[in-house]
Amino acid sequence: MSFNKITIVGNLGRDPELRYTPQGTAVCSFTMASNEKRKDKNGMQQDFTTWFRVTVWGKQAETVSKYLSKGRSVYVEGRLHVEEWQDKDGKQRYTLEVNATDVHFIDSAASAGSEGIPVRAAAASGQGAQGSRITAGNRVPPAQAEIDEDEIPF
């Protein structure tokens, strides 16, 4: 028995690209980055970024293409494989590729706009939650939002 599954949480590095196979199946591809902090060999805290190429198929590909854009946070599950190739200088290169089976949008509804408008389009048009312009300064993180004491379960 064998098992190949990867789970990644990160941000899109570019806008998704949607295309169709000759049979009419939707295929969407995008790059995403996953970041982690760890100490380097000198003991200094460093940010390390791993880039992935992601491919999504079918109806989910159309949804991803419609609602995701560069910079958006996303959760991806799928199968991982390594693509090996040579660059123009003849150096051996490797690309991590994910054939996604499940994609979840992480950004809140306020970030994406109240009517499913992608972040960039919502910010440019001034639409979003309560019709306010979407900027990092006017979004209230969920932990800081007002909570009615009657809603607390204990």
Image (tube, rainbow, N blue to C red):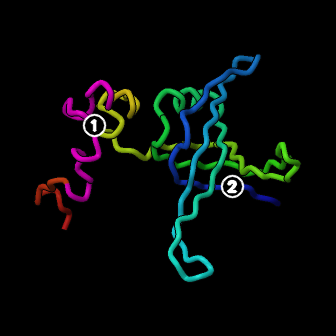
User: With respect to residue 112, does 44 lie above or below?
Assistant: below
Assign a secondary structure to mark 2. Answer: loop
The correct choice, above or below, for 50 with respect to 127 in the image is: below
Residues 110 and 137: in front is 137
Number of disc labels: 2
Residue 77, position as x, y percentages in the image: 61, 49
The residue lying at 56 percent from left, 56 percent from top is 34
Left or right, 29 with respect to 107, comes to right
Q: Which mark is residue 24?
A: none
Quarter residue 27 falls in? top right
Query: Residue 122 lies in what quarter of the image?
Result: top left
User: Residue furthest toward the bottom?
Assistant: 43
Q: Could you tell me the amino acid type at mark 1?
A: Ile
Q: Which label's residue is closer to the chain start, 1 or 2? A: 2
| Residue stretch rendered in magenta on the structure | 123-144
- Quadrant of the snapshot with the C terminus: bottom left
Nearest to the observer: residue 21 or residue 38: 38
Task: Write down the quadrant of residue 72 in the picture.
Answer: top left
Q: Which mark is residue 134?
A: 1
- Say few, some or many: other residues with alpha carbon within 10 Å of mark 2 (under 14 / 14 to 19 / 20 or more): few
* Residue at 55% from the left image edge and 77% from the top image edge: 39
- State the image coordinates of residue 119 (x, y, percent, origin top left): 38, 34
Give me the disc on residue 5.
2
Question: How far is mark 1 from mark 2, CA to CA?
Answer: 35 Å
Task: Examine the structure image and report whether residue 138 is included in the region drawn in magenta.
Answer: yes
> Is residue 33 left or right of 57 when viewed as pictured?
left
Residue 136 painted magenta:
yes
